[in-house]
Image (spheres, rainbow, N blue to C red):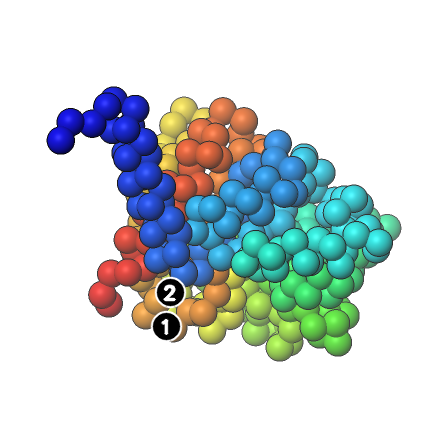
């Protein structure tokens, strides 16, 4: 029986759609992406895309270019219930909120502002029932012990504030804080069940010069969230590339986490807000989901 070209194309489209739906339903994996990678997308587009491409969660780093999340219209007191409902209706979670607060700051006025901003994010996370708020240590400038002490104090203060609100503060391995001995010292001295680590695995490998198995062995008990991305050297330092095509051992990072029974999200941090020349999220996000599905389904 002969079929027309239109019928052939329709059959192909139906097959492709079925395959796509099978991929989405099969995924069921703890994959997330940061909204840092889609700065031009509105709230509903983010949710629709995450749902359609097999993601379980989104990390909120900004919306429509605004990184001060508590001022976003979607999170105004009158809109929070609706926004929470929209997340749930898409079968998603919000993995964490990304604050820009720096714990290293010494100037009393600026330090107070950074801590106050972090508390605003903690309040928003509590209202949204989001478990984590990310902060930075950031810079190790000046007498080392004084800086470490400030970071420890800041984290402890925020942990004490966050705990009763059902939130955990996670310090990211970022900036000058990318080596296991320093991070371990800080987290040990902070001594708070409401403070943990966001492991940016790219930073500890590229800037901290650590192999992922070593980092996880040293810090695994504190790791509750991750940032994953790949890159290659270039004339400006590093250039981000699609997952699995660069020089960062992303698969080994994932396997190291799986071996310790890590239960958090594997979050793609595609830094398009800071690097507009990167490939569009419509390309990079599904590619990440595809590659990561292969990593997460491999036998240990």
Instruction: Give above or below for 64 relative to 82.
Output: above
> Which numbered circle lies on residue 173?
none
14 relative to 112 in the view: left or right? left
Within 10 Å of disc 1 (Cα), the crowding (few <14, some 14-19, many 20+) is few
166 relative to 1 in the view: left or right? right
Residue 124: quadrant of the picture: bottom right
68 and 83: which is toward the camera: 83
Name the residue at the left extreme: 1
Q: Say if residue 102 shows up in the picture.
A: no
Tag 2 secondary structure: helix
Q: Which residue is mark 1?
A: 260
Name the residue at the top extreme: 5
Residue positioned 37% across, 37% down in the render: 242
33 and 221: which is toward the camera: 33
207 relative to 160 in the view: left or right? left
Q: Say if residue 289 shows up in the picture.
A: yes
Quadrant position of the C terminus in the picture: bottom left
Q: Position of residue 48 (x, y in %)?
A: 55, 44
Residue positioned 51% across, 70% down in the render: 222
Q: Are marks 2 and 1 in contact (CB under 8 Å)?
A: yes
Residue 29: quadrant of the picture: bottom left
Q: Which residue is mark 2?
A: 257
Residue positioned 38% across, 73% down in the render: 261
77 and 253: which is toward the camera: 77
Q: Position of residue 41 (x, y in %)?
A: 61, 35
137 and 6: which is toward the camera: 6
Q: Give the Cα separation between the discs numbered 2 and 1.
A: 5 Å
Tag 1 secondary structure: loop
Quadrant position of the N terminus in the picture: top left
Within 10 Å of disc 2 (Cα), the crowding (few <14, some 14-19, many 20+) is many
Instruction: Give above or below for 247 relative to 154.
Output: above
């Amino acid at each position: 029986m002969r079929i027309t070209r239109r019928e052939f194309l329709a059959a192909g489209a139906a097959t492709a759609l079925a395959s796509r739906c099978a991929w989405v339903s099969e995924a069921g994996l703890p994959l997330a992406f940061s909204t840092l990678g889609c700065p031009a997308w509105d709230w509903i587009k983010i949710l629709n895309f995450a749902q359609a491409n097999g993601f379980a969660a989104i990390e909120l780093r900004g919306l429509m270019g605004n990184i001060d999340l508590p001022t976003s219209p979607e999170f105004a007191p009158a809109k929070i219930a609706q926004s929470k409902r929209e997340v749930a209706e898409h079968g998603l979670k919000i993995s964490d909120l990304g604050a820009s607060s720096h714990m290293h700051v010494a100037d009393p006025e600026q330090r107070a502002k950074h801590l106050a901003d972090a508390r605003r994010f903690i309040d928003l996370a509590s209202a949204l029932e989001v478990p984590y708020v990310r902060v930075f240590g950031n810079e190790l400038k000046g007498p080392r012990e004084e800086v470490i002490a400030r970071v420890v104090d800041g984290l402890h203060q925020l942990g004490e504030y966050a705990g009763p609100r059902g939130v955990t503060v996670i310090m990211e391995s970022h900036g000058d804080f990318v080596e296991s001995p320093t991070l371990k010292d800080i987290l040990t001295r902070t001594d708070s069940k409401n403070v943990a680590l966001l492991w940016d695995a790219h930073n500890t490998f590229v800037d901290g010069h650590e192999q992922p198995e070593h980092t996880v062995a040293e810090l695994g008990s504190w790791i509750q969230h991750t940032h994953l991305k790949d890159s290659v050297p270039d004339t400006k330092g590093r250039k981000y590339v699609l997952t699995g095509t660069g020089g960062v051992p992303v698969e080994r990072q994932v396997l190291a986490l799986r071996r310790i029974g890590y239960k958090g999200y594997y979050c793609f941090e595609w830094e398009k807000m800071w690097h507009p020349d990167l490939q569009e999220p419509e390309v990079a996000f599904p590619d990440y989901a595809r590659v990561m599905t292969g990593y997460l389904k491999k036998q240990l």
